[in-house]
Image (tube, rainbow, N blue to C red):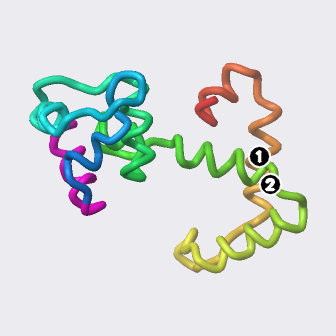
Amino acid sequence: MSFGERLAAARQKKKMTQTELGKGLGTDGADAGKQVIYGWEKNQHYPRVDQLMLICKKLDVSADFLLFGEESSSRFLMAEAAAEKLNADERAALIKRLAAEADEHDDGVFDESAVERSRSNNHNQPSSRRKKITGL
């Protein structure tokens, strides 16, 4: 699937017309015409970075999905950053809820201590190693 095909599919999933998607996507906040959106969807040309950011917000998709057809670890990194803002009790409640929902092991046991060990081991790694592990 190409960029244009993913863009068209995401737009259609939101039940949005090309004209509706184009609102505010032109130069200096003007509307982009449906012929511009059509060109994107047919891979005749591509949006600028600022337009791509607005498209992602409007369609509730990531740039990784539109550009590469897959979600990358960016959502995981955003979730991790959000979790770090939680206090200890909120984090514990979140881990407990995720543990209840996850099937982390064949036996269904989620080892919370393994998560903490992994996190502390990761922060003890040299900077280049930490970047490779976490993607930061």
- Magenta stretch encompasses residue 103: no
Numbered marks: total:
2
State the residue in front, 81 or 113: 81
Image: magenta residue range? 1-15
The residue under the point 39% across, 37% down is 63
- How far apart, in angstroms, are the residues tagged by discs 1 and 2? 5 Å
The 10 Å Cα crowd at callout 2, few under 14, some 14 to 19, many 20 or more, is: few
Q: Is residue 67 left or right of residue 119?
A: left
Picture disc at residue 119: 1
Question: Image height check: is 38 above or below 104?
Answer: above
Where residue 74 appears, as percent x and y from the top left, is 53, 41
Q: Quick one: 132 or 3, which is closer to the camera? A: 3
Q: Quick check: 135 above or below 102?
A: above
Q: Secondary structure at mark 1?
A: helix
- Amino acid type, callout 1: Arg
- Indicate left or right for 121 with 37 as reference: right
For disc 1, the neighbor class at 10 Å (few under 14, some 14 to 19, many from 20) is few
Q: Quadrant of residue 129?
A: top right
Outermost residue toward the right in this view: 88
Per the image, label 2 sits on a secondary structure element best described as: helix
Which amino acid, by three-letter code, is at mark 2? Glu
In which image quadrant can residue 121 be found? top right
* Residue 52 pos. (x, y %): 37, 32
Quarter of the image that includes the N terminus: top left
**On the picture, is 121 further left or further right than 49?**
right
Residue 55's disc is none
Q: Residue at x 53, y 47 (%)?
A: 75
The answer to which quarter of the image holds residue 90 is bottom right
Q: Residue at x 67, y 19 (%)?
A: 128
Q: Are marks 1 and 2 in contact (CB under 8 Å)?
A: yes
Quadrant where the C terminus lies? top right
Q: Which residue is mark 2?
A: 116
